[in-house]
Image (cartoon, coloured by chain):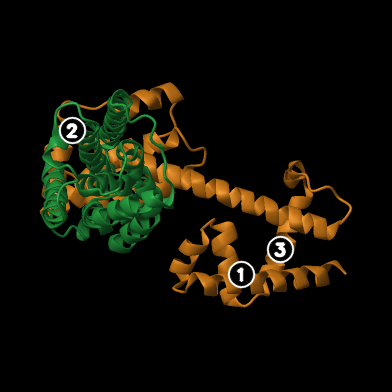
Amino acid sequence: MAGAGHIRRAPPGVVEAGERRHDAGRSERWSAWMAAAQEGDGQRYEALLHEVRPVVQAYVRKRLPSDTAVEDVVQTVLLLIHRARHSYRAERPFEPWLFAIAKNALRDHQRRGGRRARREETLRDDLRRHADPDAPGDRARSASPESGAIARELERALAKLPASQREAVTLLHLEGLSVDEAAQRVGTTRGALKARIHRAYVALRALLAGDAT
Amino acid sequence: MSRDRTDAVIAALGRDARPVRRIPPLRRQLATVLLLAAAVAVVVVAGLGLRAPGLPLLQLGSPFLWMALGLAAAGVAGATSALAFARPGREAEAWRALALGLAALGLAGLASAYAVAGSGASSEPIWRGAPELPCIIASLVFSLPAALLVTRLASRAAPLQRGRTAFVSAGSATALGALAAHLICRTPGEWHVVVTHALEPFVGALLLAAPLYALLRWWRR
């Protein structure tokens, strides 16, 4: 069990088979362990999570390219299992319950990743336009060597912002949270966060304009 | 290392394995919703009386009866779907129930339209505008108890797709509310019974989904 977390990347076909392949009685064992976990049995619960982990890893790895992202999603799935454990009923098979949670966590991760990528692109485009007003705003250039310099320029400007504004920019643009999620994270209202991010944009614009001149 | 963090997460979750109260079976939750909806319908009919001319409306093959059956089926299937959407791993069941409910409502609409067309009332206007509104408002009001209950029960499970759960909860509760409104409806016209009453669950789904979504989030905190 201890080594289960260190399985290496396998060819897609093998992973596909591995996702659903299981030893005889695994489903019954997991159902029983989850039922015990619902009663407060921490040992069986931990054993269940250790057994479930490589299965979830294989499922997620097949759909995500980065190992770090895979572990992030696996941890999210484990937390969601914990949060939703009361919703499992032992008379039903365990795997559909598990894979529904994994699928949802993966979808959330991908949605958030897409949103983050789009926002980073927009920021880079804005910066590039600022650095060279005659340059076209094509996104294909975002992967060019100048993007490193742009990122450093942005990083320096961000570091000069007040902590609350920097946090707002980081949550919205780098972590890809929505305004509601970011407001919840920092413990403020949606309106206050929007005001904070607006002030951050104004400050960033001024800082970047100063750098350019 | 991220993998070490995953081990730490598992150890922490193991330590936090307090006993939890398992959610009741879906059928029991569904029965509670239907009992509440039936109680609302009984109170409403007892207070306001059946639509004129009363019991003769319930004769076999009448548009009124077809639509009552369609709304009841849509309400039951929709509530099943909403409660199943709130339980991980039961999405297929939820989609099936939703499809069944929509099909039942569609068939009831077609059957009652056919019955109206055959009754010589086809010259009536299909939509009367503002006079249709009280019936729609009544269906929304009568749906509120079931909407709140379905949402509460869903929040106690683990709705992974809150928007979908809220939308289906709203539509199913409005179908049950529309059934109560259908029984006591005073708006004249045979087409009103067919067209407006069949549309009410969709209107309810559109209008109530956002508040139910907010409630679902609030109760899930």
> Which amino acid, mark 1?
Ile
Q: CA distance from mark 3 to mark 2?
A: 51 Å
Q: Position of residue A1 (x, y in %)?
A: 25, 40
Q: Are marks 3 and 2 on the same chain?
A: yes
Q: Colour of chain A?
A: orange
Report the disc number at residue A197.
1
Q: Nearer the viewer, residue A186 or B1?
A: A186
Q: Residue at x 38, y 47 (%)?
A: B203
Tell me, yes or no, if residue A90 can be seen here.
Answer: no
Of A162 and A201, the residue lying toward us: A201
In x, y percent, where is residue B132? Answer: 37, 48
Residue toward you, A67 or B150 = B150
Give the residue type at disc 3. Answer: Leu
Q: Residue at x 38, y 51 (%)?
A: B131
- Graded by Cα atoms within 10 Å as few (under 14), some (14 to 19) or many (20 or more), the crowding at tag 1 reads many
Chain colored green: B
* Residue that label 3 marks: A154
Residue B111 percent across, percent down from the top left: 28, 25
Residue A39 located left or right of residue B64: left
CA gap, disc 3 and disc 1? 15 Å
The reply to whether discs 3 and 2 touch (Cβ–Cβ < 8 Å) is no
Residue at image mark 2: A27
Quadrant of the snapshot with the C terminus of chain B? bottom left
Which chain is indicated by disc 3? A
The amino acid at mark 2 is: Ser
